[in-house]
Image: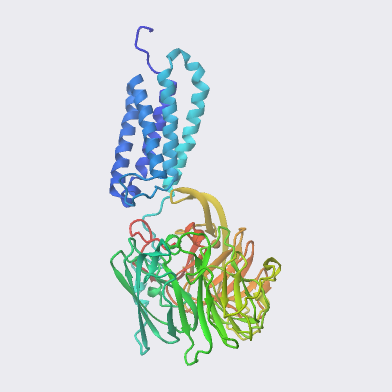
Amino acid sequence: MTSRPATLPRAAVLPAALAVLAAAAVRASIVPEQFDEFAPYGILFIAIAATQAGYAVGILARPSRILAWTGVAGSLALVLLWLVATNASLPFSPTPWQPRPMTAPDVACVLLEVLAAVLLGVAALQRPRRVRWLSPVLALAVAASLPLSGLGFAAVASGMPVEVNTSSAIPGRPATEMASLVEPSGPQPVRRFTLVAEARQVAGATAWTYNGVVPGPELRVVQGDRVHVTLVNHLPVATTIHWHGIAVPNAEDGVAGVTQDAVPPGASAVYDFVVRDPGTYWYHSHQDTADQLPLGLYGPLVVLPAGAPAAGRDYPLVIHQAVGGSGGLAVNGAAAPRLDAAPGEPVRLRIISAVPGAEDGAPEQLVLLGAPYVVAALDGHDLHGPQALEAERLPLEIGQRIDLVFTMPARGAVRLVDANGDESLTIGSGGAPAAPALDGLPQLDLTRYGTPAPDPLLGRAAFDVTFPLVLGNQPGFREGTFEEIHTINGSAAPYGPMFMVRPGQAVRLHIVNRTDESHPIHLHGHVMTLLDRDGRPFEGSPIHQDTVLVGRQQTVDVAFLADNPGLWMLHCHVLMHAATGMSAMLVYENVRTPYSMGTRSGNAPE
Ligand code: C2O
Ligand code: CU
């Protein structure tokens, strides 16, 4: 026995081979995604997985010291390769000098390889008769390799789906086609715009812009106009434009994978719709929104009331993250801008929040100082009989708009400050009022602001249909990573709930927030009327919003009239919440779309 060349302890070789095999399997299962990203990665992954599988078989069949040391070196080389790729970049890469994101399958492979290297090293150093000393270590190693490969496979299984279609039609039967849900031709005056989506240097940083500016150009139109926008895509990726808050015909909604395919680089698309409701709106990309919007793809859209001559100053103000990553906020691209207004002049501020939002979704808290003012409109819709207010905190979530109207005082300036930070904006000349202790200020209570007015959805005894929306969050696997997932009724997009309605129905949404985060819930294509919050009815002016703030652990009831057939998104507008699953669909019966989300089309609306 002792005369034979020393064989390696099986107790170490066996788990090592299993770990290498598990790493090969996990890697093999993500080959398609690698091909989608960059073909050479796919080839590299196949080569590595095949080598690993061959190696595992080899060391089991003919264990030898030299083979064991080769395994140690090979495994460590793979770990090194991954460290370089995630921290710097590989010399060959589709995006030069951009580190590879750290994903769960990669991490599982690397941990399995570290494990294999240790076991193989121990095996190579060990003589057979000392195996007994090894057994607890080996038991531990085997125990560790199981959850590790499980982690890898769970992550792989949670990958982005190949194809998800949101049609509500029965396959093979006639249905309303997406292509038919367009604006009928009419006599409206046509307003034409071209928005070129392109990467540009803005304030010393690369931004993704419309027409070279962040925010994008102001589109100012008049109620009843026909708006005709050509989107030209000069970005390196596909994109769309969504007309947030405007009840456009479904096919004009700009949602990648639902109402259209994302427009590829070099191509263009046309949006055509009539603006029937005056007010403050905005537009933004709805492809890969969580990435594209913060890079600068958003802008204001103002619809002036027909036949009402403009009086005084009218300023759309987009609040957004400053370009260049200082972390601070900006208003219309400037850190602390000053706007013109003369004493006695009426001023309307149309404030739009494009701030992607904190992780907990907490809204911005705006405070207007220096003049009494009214909240004239929310999300573009006028309030009835709004009372003049003193300094109060006005919460504003991403996606929401608030119009403040006031008259410039006889002397001094007016200031708008954000109680979450020290951003501010000054209107008029002269000394600006000092900010009081913002924390102590009351918050505007919308349940009793303004005066009541008749409303088709308020004071209704019954609704045709009520949908509960339970908002939740929990850790879990999603798109190859382990992270906090956001759910509606327990499921995460693109497998979120589909709420089915028929034209003419009065629909109630009973939104229950079971999280310690705030969620601005946005419904495309419709306007919601707020009914009650935590059981307390809205008793002031009727409130009409397309983006409703549901505070932590709050319950909010809203209603809307199903008057715009199609397939509509219903999602939290905090970009990271939507991107991690908090997105559902409102679908009218029997509507079919040819577009799908997923890796096959590359459409990813969140
Ligand atoms: Cu402002 Cu679905 O978006
Ligand atoms: Cu949210």
Q: Residue furthest right?
A: 440
Does 384 sit left or right of 582 as displayed? right
Residue 272: x, y in percent?
36, 79
Residue found 41% across the figure and 38% down from its top? 109
Does 49 sit left or right of 332 as displayed? left
Residue 197: x, y in percent?
35, 68
Where's the C terminus, which quadrant?
A: bottom left
Q: Nearer the viewer, residue 476 or 576?
A: 576
Residue found 49% across the figure and 37% down from its top? 147
Give the total number of marks visible in the rendering. Answer: 0
Residue found 36% across the figure and 65% down from its top? 200
Q: Quadrant of residue 217?
A: bottom left
Residue 193: x, y in percent?
35, 79
| Vertical order, 422 against 100 (above or below) | below
Residue found 43% across the figure and 60% down from its top? 291
Q: Does the rendering let one see residue 68?
A: yes
| Vertical order, 605 against 221 (above or below) | above
